[in-house]
Image: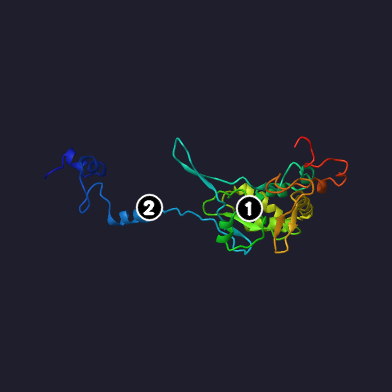
Amino acid sequence: MYEMNSLERYEKTKRGKQLTGKKKRGRQAGSKTSTDSATKKEKAPTKRKSKKVQQARSKHEEIKYGDMDCKLMVEEEGGHIFRVAPLDGLSFLTTFSRDASKKLRPSEKYTLQQLELFTLTQYPELMESVKMKAPPQAVGIRCRNCIAEKNGCCFMKVSSVKNLARDVLLMVTEHVTNCKFMKARDAKVVQEIINEEHNELGKYCTLLAKLYCLEDSKSGGVVFGDSPTVPPGYCEPSDINVNALVPELETESHPTVESSSHM
């Protein structure tokens, strides 16, 4: 009888087949079945193209968007083109109103830092683009964060002196909290103002209106009025009425800016 030698017996074991290269019928060593490949294809993660999220614009009729006539500048070394924002805005927080601003909540103060007043009629192309009519020296509110945005800065026309605080809150709810240039943590601070009482904010805006000599226009909106203590054309874009801030100040005993010897 034929007896298998030790080499033949070893080749028939599982370990022997692996080492000697013996293969199972119908399948090559190292090959993958169609089922295995299909399963792996299903498990393979699919790459999704990221889409740029565009800022959602407010549809409120008083909220507008437009170019603030920013100047294009070219960097000399790199050749990069950037936009320079205009500097004709007036801050809601000033040194004249420092004491009054201390009564504001942190959320109110931080909110006012995001906005500024400006002379709306200095931008005729802007007004034409949004089909807005306003009297000369009409006052507007705009966002300081997106003022140089090429797709348009958010702004609105001040409705009345009495409603200045209301207009500020409208800008907050309709734009500031959603402005794409605001960080999430900063937007959260600003959003706190929505659910708070606004008694101090109303008082502060009344004081600021006196500071910047804001007056209601007969043709609608708010305009910069003339100051009794500062000659026209001295302070642009508005004249500052110091008497409105210091009631005890008497113009008879104190020289006005116009009559001062050092001017």
Residue 61: which quarter of the image? bottom right
Residue 72 in sight here: yes
Query: Hey, what amino acid is under mark 1?
Result: Arg
In screen coordinates, is 149 left or right of 195? Answer: left
At which x and y percent is residue 178? 60, 54
Which of these two is toward me, 89 or 223? 223
> Residue at image x 52%, y 51%?
150
At which x and y percent is residue 13? 24, 44
How packed is label 1: few (under 14 Cα within 10 Å), some, or many (20 or more)? many
Q: Are marks 2 and 1 in contact (CB under 8 Å)?
A: no
The nearer-to-camera label among 2 and 1 is 1
At which x and y percent is residue 24? 22, 50
Residue at disc 2, secondary structure: loop
**How many numbered discs, if any?**
2
> Residue at image x 86%, y 47%?
247
In screen coordinates, is 44 left or right of 52? Answer: left
Residue at disc 1, secondary structure: strand
Residue 175 in sight here: no
Q: Which residue is mark 2?
A: 44
> Residue at image x 63%, y 50%?
187
Which of these two is toward me, 31 or 199? 199
At which x and y percent is residue 248? 88, 45
Q: Earlier in the sequence, mark 2 or mark 1?
A: 2
Check residue 142 in the rendering and tell me which mark sits there, or answer none: 1
Q: What separation in Å lies between label 2 and label 1 (alpha carbons)? A: 49 Å
